[in-house]
Amino acid sequence: MDVKGVMAAISFDGDWITITKKELGHRDRHYRISVRDVTGVTFKPASRLFHGYIQFLVPGSAPARESRGVFLGGRPPQSDRNSLSIAYKHNAPAEKIVAAIEEARIRLSP
């Protein structure tokens, strides 16, 4: 299951979440999170004017604060390794991947 983000992508195989960040002039960076380590998921759908985001909460890492500004629209910064911004046209796939991750968290919880 995959979702394209803004200069990023996310994939979920049932056990692992892989976030790929893309920056101009740099190599792609891949971050893997076990679904067992996720303590929460924040999903803010995108509007037609502003990008939304998916953010994963993990122990030992404080959630990134939303950046404020005309062009940022209240989303975590690109440097936050546990989140990615999504465009309006990717809201439906993002909802599906968030639901699958939440279901896996419940299924795999002790």
Image (cartoon, rainbow, N blue to C red):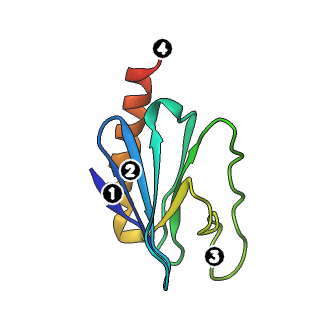
Residue indicated by mark 1: 92
Residue indicated by mark 3: 72
Q: How crowded is mark 2: few (under 14 residues within 10 Å), some or many (20 or more)?
A: some
Which x, y percent locates residue 42? 56, 47
Q: Do the residues labelled 3 and 1 touch (CB within 8 Å)?
A: no
Q: Do the residues labelled 4 and 2 touch (CB within 8 Å)?
A: no
Q: Which amino acid does label 4 sit on?
A: Pro
**Which marked residue is nearer to the observer: mark 1 or mark 4?**
4
Rendered image: mark on residue 110: 4
Which x, y percent locates residue 56? 55, 46
65 left or right, relative to 54: right
Viewer-proximal residue among 49 and 2: 2
User: What residue is shown at x 56% (from left), y 53% (from top)?
Assistant: 82
Q: Is residue 14 above or below residue 92?
A: above
Q: Which of marks 3 and 2 is nearer the N terminus?
A: 3
Q: Do the residues labelled 1 and 2 touch (CB within 8 Å)?
A: yes
Q: In which quarter of the image is residue 80?
A: bottom right
Q: Which amino acid does label 2 sit on?
A: Glu
Label 1: element kind: helix
Q: How far apart are marks 1 and 2 (CA)?
A: 5 Å
Q: In this view, does 77 lie above or below 54?
A: below
Q: In this view, does 38 lie above or below 50?
A: above
User: What residue is shown at x 60% (from left), y 39% (from top)?
Assistant: 58
